[in-house]
Amino acid sequence: MEIHCAYDQLVLVADLKPHPKNPNTHSAAQVAAIAAVIECNGWRAPITVSNRSGFITRGHGRLEAALLVGCEQVPVDFQDYASEQAELADMLADNHLAELAEIDEDRLVGVLKEVQAAGHDVGLAGFTEDEVARLTAVEEEIAQLEPIPKMELQAFRALRLPRVHVQGHPRLAARAAIAQGREGRFQHQPQIPKERNRRVIQPARPTSPRQLPLERAPAAVGIVALHSRGIHHRQSRSPLR
């Protein structure tokens, strides 16, 4: 197997020790993909080992791939670390920093098409045929969408439309949400505060002594006649006199 990378020495696979604090795990599919790349392209990056602890700090997946393809020796780069914390930080950075990259899907599809057109196996780029087909189909669907006028884009940004989820394709999801806006959802409907919609029901006031509780009714009461334009009092004698 060809080695194209710089390294310090070839080391037996059996002598390499994975780092016990490595948080990353590698699925069988990922290990198989790494193994296919190593078999076809050779070694393009060595496995890094700490001089301080003797543990691997970079290349745990490459070690598993080497075991899968049956390599006896692998290229190793030995590095110095000032402390255990520096060693752990370097290992975590190697695992995590690549995850922070953002992919330009338009450029990615163009490169994958170029690789396919040359008859090269896209699997050696780490992509399956299904992934390439999905990315290509999404780009073709986006290309068929009609351009969105600037006024509609401004209206879309001003409103909060329901989220439209298209799995794995944020740009297509945004276009689908705008398409919903074209169906009439750009008409803004102001929301009325809940307090204004609330109907306050007050208890009816008693208008005659008969509606008063017995303990509150006096011996002599004024019969109140309520009219729309005033209040008139009429005194009545108690029937007990």
Image: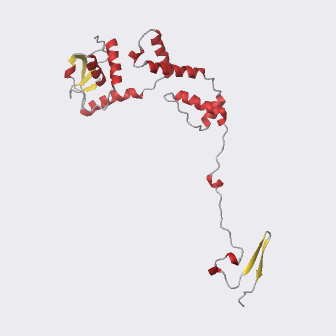
Residue 12 percent coordinates (x, y): 20, 18
Q: Residue at x 32, y 22 (%)?
A: 31
Q: Toward which corner of the image does residue 215 lie, by quadrant? A: bottom right
* Residue 79 x %, y %: 25, 23
Instruction: From the viewer's perspective, tell me whether residue 115 is left or right of residue 87.
Output: right
In this orientation, does residue 8 appear?
A: no
> Does residue 222 show up?
yes
Residue 161 placement: quadrant:
top right
Residue 12 falls left or right of residue 201: left
Q: Quadrant of the C terminus?
A: bottom right
Q: Estimate the x, y position of residue 121 in percent, counting from the top left.
A: 41, 13
Residues 35 and 191: in front is 35
Splitting the image into 4 quarters, where does residue 46 fall? top left
Residue located 63% across and 26% down the image:
148
Q: In the rendered view, would you say 221 is above or below 205?
A: below
Say which residue appears at 40% left-offset and 28% top-offset.
99
Q: How is the image coloured?
A: secondary structure
